[in-house]
Image (tube, rainbow, N blue to C red):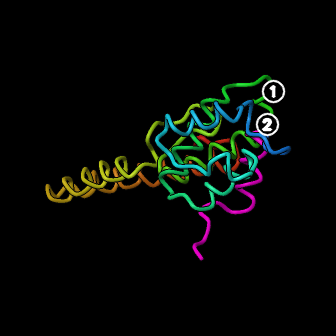
């Protein structure tokens, strides 16, 4: 039996954001639900299986690959759009964090200003290559500065994401 990509806590957050409590998913009808997944080119349990839209989505999320799960959750959040009071809901930020984790990319969890792409592999590689070039040129101070910049930027972003504030030293 394969292990689900999403924890039970993740699933509760998804269910809350997508209004899945009563068997529905957002404002989808059976037809629009099927069309949504067809547009994404994603196979989901057919309506004929006798399952609610929420049960079909849960089954999909338990069996989908990480990439498919991330793509569907991202698309569902886009479909949902912004609602009044979203800025007060911690579940929205948590949902975005789940998608971010699944996508393996940095996605700002709040409207707080962040340095884009700081937590991406591309950013880390860029600074690593700069440090290596400076080492090759015997610029030890420059290599240390670039390395310190990388560590500080990553730690600042982690602090911001975990606490919602940055000490900004």
* Viewer can see residue 156: no
Q: Secondary structure at mark 2?
A: loop
Q: Which residue is mark 2?
A: 89
Which segment is the magenta one? 1-18
Toward the right, the furthest residue is: 22
- Quick check: 99 left or right of 20? left
Measuring 69% from the left and 25% from the top, which residue is drawn there? 82
- Quarter-of-image position of residue 128: bottom left
Q: Quadrant of the N terminus?
A: bottom right
Badge 2 density bin: few <14, some 14–19, many ≥20, Cα 10 Å = few
Q: Is residue 137 above or below residue 95?
A: below
Question: Could you say which is closer to the camera, residue 80 or residue 131?
Answer: 80
Toward the bottom, the furthest residue is: 1
Question: Could you say which is closer to the camera, residue 39 or residue 138?
Answer: 39
Q: Is residue 117 above or below residue 5?
A: above
Question: Could you say which is closer to the camera, residue 117 or residue 7?
Answer: 7
Q: Which residue is mark 1?
A: 85
Measuring 79% from the left and 39% from the top, which residue is drawn there? 19
Residue 72 numbered tag? none
* Spot occupied by residue 107 in the image (x, y as percentages of width and height): 54, 41
Question: Could you say which is closer to the camera, residue 105 or residue 41?
Answer: 41
């Amino acid at each position: 039996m394969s292990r689900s990509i999403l924890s039970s806590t993740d699933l509760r957050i998804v269910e809350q954001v997508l209004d899945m409590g009563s068997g529905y998913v957002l404002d989808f009808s059976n037809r629009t639900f099927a069309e949504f997944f067809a547009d994404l080119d994603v196979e989901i349990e057919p309506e004929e299986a006798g399952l609610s839209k929420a049960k079909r989505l849960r089954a999909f999320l338990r069996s989908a690959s990480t990439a498919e799960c991330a793509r569907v959750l991202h698309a569902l959040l886009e479909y949902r759009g912004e609602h009044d009071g979203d800025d007060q809901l911690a579940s929205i930020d948590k949902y975005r964090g789940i998608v971010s984790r699944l996508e393996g990319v940095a996605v700002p969890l709040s409207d707080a200003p962040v340095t884009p792409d700081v937590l991406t592999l591309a950013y880390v590689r860029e600074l690593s290559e700069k440090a290596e070039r400076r080492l090759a040129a015997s610029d030890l101070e420059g290599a240390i500065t670039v390395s310190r910049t990388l560590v500080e930027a990553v730690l600042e972003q982690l602090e911001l994401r975990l606490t919602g504030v940055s000490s900004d030293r």
